[in-house]
Amino acid sequence: MTKHHILQVGAYPEWDQGPLDAAYTVHRWWEAADKDAFLAKVGPGVDAIATRGDLGASEAMIAACPKLKMISVFGVGYDAVHLASCRSRGIRVSNTPDVLTEDVADIAVAMLLALVRRTGPAEAWVRSGDWATKGMFPLTRKVSGTRAGILGLGRIGMAIGRRLQGFGMEIAYSARSPKPGAEGWAFVPDAVTLAKQSDHLFVALAATPETRHIVNATVLQALGPEGTVINISRAANVDETALLDALEGGRIAGAALDVFEGEPNLNPRFLTATNVLLQPHHGSGTIETRKAMGKLMRDNLTAHFAGQPLLTPVL
Ligand code: 8YV
């Protein structure tokens, strides 16, 4: 039987690559030296695109694939997929929600604790010999019992809140509307109000044109000089210039970031900032979760080609 043609946008672990290569004719876009020429050559025969949350599928890429009927995203975020093109052409889109919720929430809490209790600088204090020569590591700040603001109370935001309850934190959230399951957590209508009443602001929003730079200079000013920002969503939700200005100016206490504009290349100002914790977009980066994500990405492709409903449809 002739195999369907898949345009693969980025690398997957071998446990996904093997089954994809066995089931489909796979065209590896990210390995092409001349990506435009590659797309012009293979695009006309592409039946589906297999991509990642961080890579998506651009308008130009979709336009180069006139037979395209399906885009399967390895990741929960589909903001990098040009949905308008998919809607206008009736292209199906799937993502991989739920299977990664707990890992991303885990890393968000880990980043908060590491940032505020300064576990990285503390380890350097030991390894450098400063402990022996300079004495006790400088005191940090308490996390338990402080005030958490969660911007976006979807699956990941809700999971973060449940974890923070275990630290005795007072929880408030901002979302389009009050959420069931968040009883006892304060619903506030907007990011500035949330920031004003938070010590630690978690950015857990899906990235959309409406949320771009929702964490801006005004929100950071409201958060204040003892406040921190923890972003495990998308860099687009934060005005990085305003964040860097606030960090360098001491107008907020710190930031813990797993996502960056232009990643994996960062604004070099982040590399010299002392009150920022940098992580390489690995919120979902565990063996167990990435295996589950990969299987779901592949199962959505299988369902599509079998004419079945998608397991986790976006469109
Ligand atoms: C993905 C992500 O693992 O889920 C998402 O949208 O950003 C990550 O969890 C990443 O995009 C895949 O490399």
Image: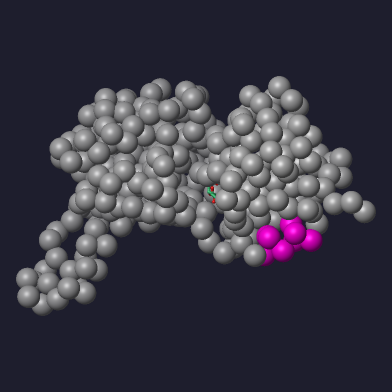
Residue at the (38%, 54%) spot, across then down: 279
The stretch drawn in magenta includes residue 107: no
- 118 relative to 63, above or below: below
Q: Quadrant of residue 194?
A: top left
What quarter of the picture does the N terminus occupy?
bottom right
- 300 relative to 57, above or below: below
Residue 22 screen position, x and y as percent: 79, 61
Residue range highlighted in magenta: 15-22
The stretch drawn in magenta includes residue 19: yes
Residue 32 screen position, x and y as percent: 61, 51
Residue at the (22%, 48%) spot, across then down: 273
- Toward the viewer: 212 or 86? 86
Tell me, what colour scheme is on the image? one colour
Going by the image, does 5 lie left or right of 314? right
Residue 272 screen position, x and y as percent: 22, 50
Q: Is residue 196 visible?
A: no
- Toward the viewer: 17 or 111? 17
Residue at the (32%, 25%) spot, across then down: 193
